[in-house]
């Protein structure tokens, strides 16, 4: 509707004339059709919605008395009195009672909703007026339109400001009708001809219009005006009807504003923020698809049912859940599908879910696998061998060069430091490298194989403590420097954890009878075991009671970094071919003691304590029903390592950060002491530089000697000359 | 995590590997409801579990109407062992449901227990012995004497819980709001953080009275909204990098893990109202953190 414009003057005049006729109709307004007699008076004001009718009725009664007593207290009210009811549209003008204040409360609400209705009503009104041959139709309509907006607000204001009206008794002119002293009497009201002038707005009216114009302002930075915003806010509140809206008013305010500026994207556009979620979901969906083609479906099903390397993750997860450990069930299932995928991709004989290692940016899911017989790992091996070969060659090169140099110039003393002999890494399928490990960050991502671990890496890993970042190729910056990147460190930690915390109930594994015994490998002991077919299972209560009922089934890692001991010096001498053994021999053959560790299948009760604390904690999973519980053992040395056993089943799991527990603080090793420089020998002797005085003294002495020598020569020559002369 | 949404919260926080067994869950659901009724708390949070050698402690916290008021902490341990029973056995089923109120933590407690190291035993009446050198003066002589101080495990429990709360309890921005009258309320219109906000450490606050806030420059304060930004953000925690923030399931879940107190996990599903934190761990601070980063 158009901008508010001055209220036509005739309006105030009209109600006065109409009032009498309309008062009796007020009550029945809603019920009867308005009389068309007053069709001239176009309801210049918008039409209240049906919701207002009842309120009008109610308030009409209230203000009834007022009108008679004090006349329309407000001019604006009179103007607003033009609000006809729906029935009024049909013909007559029905002035809603002069208590304009009444609908004010409801005015703002239906404003929006009935804007359209008002427009249609206006149209119908126009038609009516045309029919009735209103001359000033357009003008009236204009004023109708113009008045619509301010009137509502005006009512709103007027409702509160009834008292003000009485104060503004300053006469402004002939149109000022709200003089409280002016008493209307029906007889005085007569039909006033509709004047063609556009009257000036009432001051109240003007104030209202100004206020509304102000509220409708928009700024350059923001296209939402306060007016619209308040309308939106109130509409939202009334639509949603939250409880106790006052307490959440500010939040609602903010939300409404945000919604205006950030409407929901339409369905055609993708939400960029959710991209990674969808991507991940896609990838994980791939996990769930069966790989079989159409015709082979049945056969594959049979094969799968018969034998699969994938373990029953769900069962394990169930048991661990009884203990309060483990991932959620849907995550476990996804891991199961991911392992299945791994088994399909690689030639795997046995497979086990080892656990989850948490990292800073990403986590690692680790699978422990064993390849089928005969499947060798290939590339990794070759690379490592080359590296080792290269290191062996270097010392040779140095020595040869040295020989040449010796003859030419002064030899630069060779540093006495030799790198400690490299302990060779263990063969695959034995010792620390018994199993292969695959890692992935999340189920659905591709699995990466971890390289075999070298003893040096294990030794260094014992000295440092670093968080995993989640990226396999991240460097490990530490002191002492770790030989490798995060993949190697991860593998070393996995090896340590496996060696320390993989346990099984006593009797589950036994040594195989044909094992050759201790002649191999210098007393390393047996290193293989097999499942005991006669294992009966140990009662859960006994398992919890005593640690002697559990045994380690992985080999202990010696301080050297291997499971089976190897004398590093022996190897070194074998590699040495040149005759430079003398130098090596000079250092002295270091007697290296053979390192011995506890043999395989030792019970846990033999484990060393940590500061008077047992390294294992055993519990029943559910104390309320011991008949059905499982025995759960928790490692105190490696927090995060769990094992459960129930009946004939058992399993190990690790979920944690991958670090050992130590009651003391971590102390990084100090840097090595500074090496001595070359020792003094007749060839090379270290002397202090002469001081200035010494040099000068020396110079003076030399000059003196020189001078003395010259004198002597001169003397001799003189003597000779004299001799000759004679 | 809120006791009302316990099951869902446990699901979401399970990525760290520690959760609760089904029987514990069931008993917690019931007992926390009863706690709420008995103590007349506005909200009851299941704080977490401290693993001890003999038994574990289950900790719950109750909040009153004002969310930042000091929280009451309750714990539930296992029954004492009698005779030859195995450690961890419960004497009677009653003990599973009983919660005991812990005294509020004081400065002295924290100082006193800072000398204690090692694991929790799991028995609240266990006493740690700590020998201290104290100067005793008798007459004119001043000499040092070794005094054995006994500290109860309950005290240690209280101070550890308090330390963990002050250091690493987390709340997303917008979950609580402050009214001009003073009290802090739960924001009922909190719709969750948006994805871009969820990845930033600055959208998470410490769930405690602000300490750093006053030290901010005026320029920084001007950008803050006083009704929402009235707690310290995680961004400026020392040492830097002591929080590991990860998105799981694509972008559907953001998980914060504290590296200073390993075992504390905070989770939040962006764009939803689900958030919470839980501590499951040994109750020991990771002092080696600077070496490990």
Image: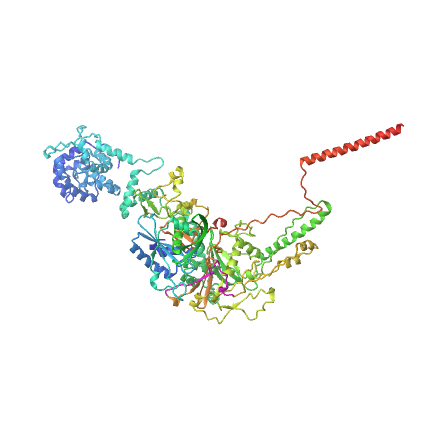
Q: Quadrant of the image for the C terminus of chain A? A: top right
Residue at (29% x, 53% y) in the render: B40
Q: Position of residue A263 (x, y in %)?
A: 35, 44
**Along the line of sight, the residue nearer the viewer: A363 or A191:** A363
Q: Residue A29's image quarter?
A: top left
Q: Nearer the viewer, residue B21 or A82?
A: B21
Confirm whether the magenta stretch covers residue A622: yes
Q: Is residue B130 visible?
A: yes
- Check the picture and name the quadrant holding the N terminus of chain A: top left
* Image coords of residue B180 (percent x, y): 31, 42
- Please, what is the dominant secondary structure of the magenta stretch? loop
Residue B59 sits above or below residue A527 on the image:
above
Image location (x, y in percent) of residue A485: 54, 52
Could you say where residue A272 lies in the image, as x and y percent from the top left?
42, 47
The structure's colour scheme is rainbow
Please give the range of residues in magenta: A602-624
């Amino acid at each position: 509707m158009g901008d508010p414009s001055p209220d036509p003057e005739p309006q105030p005049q009209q109600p006065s004339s109409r009032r009498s006729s309309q008062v009796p109709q007020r009550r029945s307004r809603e019920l009867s059709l308005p009389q068309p007699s007053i069709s001239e008076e176009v309801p210049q004001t918008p039409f209240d919605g049906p919701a207002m009718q009842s309120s009008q009725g109610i308030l009409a009664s209230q203000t009834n008395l007022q009108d008679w007593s004090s006349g329309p207290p407000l001019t604006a009210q009179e103007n607003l009195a033009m609000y006809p009811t729906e029935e009024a549209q049909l013909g007559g003008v029905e002035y809603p009672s002069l208590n304009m204040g009444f609908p004010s409360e409801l005015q703002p609400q239906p404003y929006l909703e009935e804007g359209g209705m008002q427009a249609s009503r206006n149209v119908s009104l126009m038609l009516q007026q045309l029919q009735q041959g209103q001359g000033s139709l357009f003008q009236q309509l204009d004023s109708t339109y113009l008045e619509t907006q301010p009137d509502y607000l005006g009512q709103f204001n007027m409702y509160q400001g009834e008292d003000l009206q009485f104060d503004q008794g300053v006469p402004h002119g002939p149109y000022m009708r709200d003089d409280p002293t002016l008493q209307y009497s029906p007889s005085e009201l007569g039909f006033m001809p509709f004047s063609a002038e556009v009257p000036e707005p009432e001051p109240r009216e003007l104030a209202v219009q100004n206020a509304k114009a102000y509220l409708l302002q928009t700024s350059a930075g923001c296209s939402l005006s306060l007016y619209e915003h308040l309308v939106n806010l109130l509409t939202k509140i009334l639509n949603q009807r939250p409880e106790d809206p006052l307490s959440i008013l500010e939040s609602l305010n903010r939300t409404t504003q945000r919604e205006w500026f950030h409407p929901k994207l339409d369905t055609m556009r993708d939400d960029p923020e959710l991209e990674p979620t969808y991507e991940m979901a896609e990838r994980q969906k791939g996990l769930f698809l069966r790989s079989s083609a159409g015709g082979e479906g049945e056969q594959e099903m049979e094969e799968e049912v018969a034998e699969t390397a994938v373990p029953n993750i769900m069962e394990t997860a169930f048991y661990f859940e009884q203990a309060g450990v483990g991932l959620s069930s849907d995550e476990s299932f996804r891991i199961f599908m991911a392992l299945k995928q791994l088994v399909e991709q690689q030639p795997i004989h046995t497979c086990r879910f080892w656990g989850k290692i948490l990292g800073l940016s990403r986590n690692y899911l680790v699978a422990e696998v064993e390849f089928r017989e005969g499947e060798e790992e290939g590339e990794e091996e070759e690379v490592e061998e080359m590296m080792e070969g290269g290191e062996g060659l270097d010392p040779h090169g140095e020595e040869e060069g040295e020989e040449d140099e010796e003859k030419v110039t002064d030899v630069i003393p060779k540093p006495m430091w030799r790198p400690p002999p490299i302990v060779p890494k263990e063969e695959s399928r034995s010792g620390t490298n018994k199993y292969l490990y695959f890692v992935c960050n999340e189920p659905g991502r591709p699995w990466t194989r971890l390289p075999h671990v070298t003893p040096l890496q294990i030794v260094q890993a014992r000295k440092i403590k670093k968080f995993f970042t989640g990226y396999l190729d991240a460097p490990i910056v530490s002191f002492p420097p770790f030989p490798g990147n995060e993949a190697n460190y991860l593998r070393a930690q996995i090896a340590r954890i496996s060696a320390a915390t993989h346990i099984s109930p006593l009797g589950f594994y036994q040594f195989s009878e044909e094992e050759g015994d201790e002649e191999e490998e210098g007393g390393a002991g047996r290193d293989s075991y097999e499942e005991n077919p006669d294992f009966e299972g140990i009662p859960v209560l006994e398992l919890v009671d005593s640690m002697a009922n559990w045994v380690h089934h992985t080999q202990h890692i010696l301080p050297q970094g291997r499971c089976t001991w190897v004398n590093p010096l022996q190897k070194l001498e074998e590699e040495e071919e040149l005759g430079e053994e003398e130098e090596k021999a000079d250092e002295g053959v270091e007697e290296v003691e053979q390192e011995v560790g506890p043999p395989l299948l030792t019970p846990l009760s033999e484990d060393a304590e940590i500061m008077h604390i047992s390294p294992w904690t055993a519990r029943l999973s559910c104390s309320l029903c011991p008949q059905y519980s499982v025995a759960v053992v928790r490692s105190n040395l490696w927090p995060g390592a769990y094992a459960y056993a129930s009946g004939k089943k058992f399993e190990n799991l690790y979920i944690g950060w991958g670090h050992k527990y130590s009651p003391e603080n971590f102390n990084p090793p100090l840097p090595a002491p500074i090496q001595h420089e070359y020792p003094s020998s007749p060839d090379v002797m270290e002397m202090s530089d002469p001081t200035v005085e010494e040099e000068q003294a020396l110079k003076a002495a030399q000059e003196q000697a020189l001078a003395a020598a010259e004198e002597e020569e001169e003397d001799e020559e003189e003597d000779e000359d004299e001799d000759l002369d004679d | 995590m809120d006791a009302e949404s316990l099951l869902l919260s446990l699901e979401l926080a399970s990525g760290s590997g520690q959760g609760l067994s089904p029987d514990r869950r069931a008993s917690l659901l019931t007992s926390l409801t009863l706690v709420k009724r008995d103590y007349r708390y506005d909200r009851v949070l299941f704080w977490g579990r401290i693993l001890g050698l003999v038994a574990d402690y289950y900790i719950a916290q109750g909040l009153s109407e004002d969310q930042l008021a000091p929280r009451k902490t309750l714990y539930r341990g296992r029954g004492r062992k009698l005779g030859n029973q195995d450690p961890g056995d419960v004497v009677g089923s009653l003990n599973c449901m009983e919660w005991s109120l812990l005294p509020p933590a004081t400065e002295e407690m924290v100082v006193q227990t800072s000398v204690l190291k090692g694991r929790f035993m799991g028995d609240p009446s266990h006493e740690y012995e700590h020998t201290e050198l104290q100067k005793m003066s008798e007459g004119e002589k001043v000499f040092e004497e070794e005094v054995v101080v006994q500290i109860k495990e309950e005290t240690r429990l209280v101070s550890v819980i308090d330390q963990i709360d002050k250091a690493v309890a987390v709340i997303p921005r917008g979950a609580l709001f402050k009214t001009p009258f003073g009290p802090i309320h739960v924001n009922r219109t909190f719709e969750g953080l948006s994805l871009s906000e969820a990845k930033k450490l600055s959208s998470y606050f410490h769930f405690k009275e602000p300490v750093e806030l006053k030290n901010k420059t005026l320029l920084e304060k001007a950008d803050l909204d006083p009704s929402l930004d009235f707690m310290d953000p995680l961004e400026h925690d020392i040492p830097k990098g002591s929080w590991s923030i990860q998105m799981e399931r694509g972008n559907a879940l953001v998980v914060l893990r504290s590296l200073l107190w390993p075992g504390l996990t905070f989770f939040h599903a962006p764009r939803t109202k689900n958030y919470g934190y839980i501590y499951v761990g040994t109750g020991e601070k990771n002092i080696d953190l600077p070496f490990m980063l």
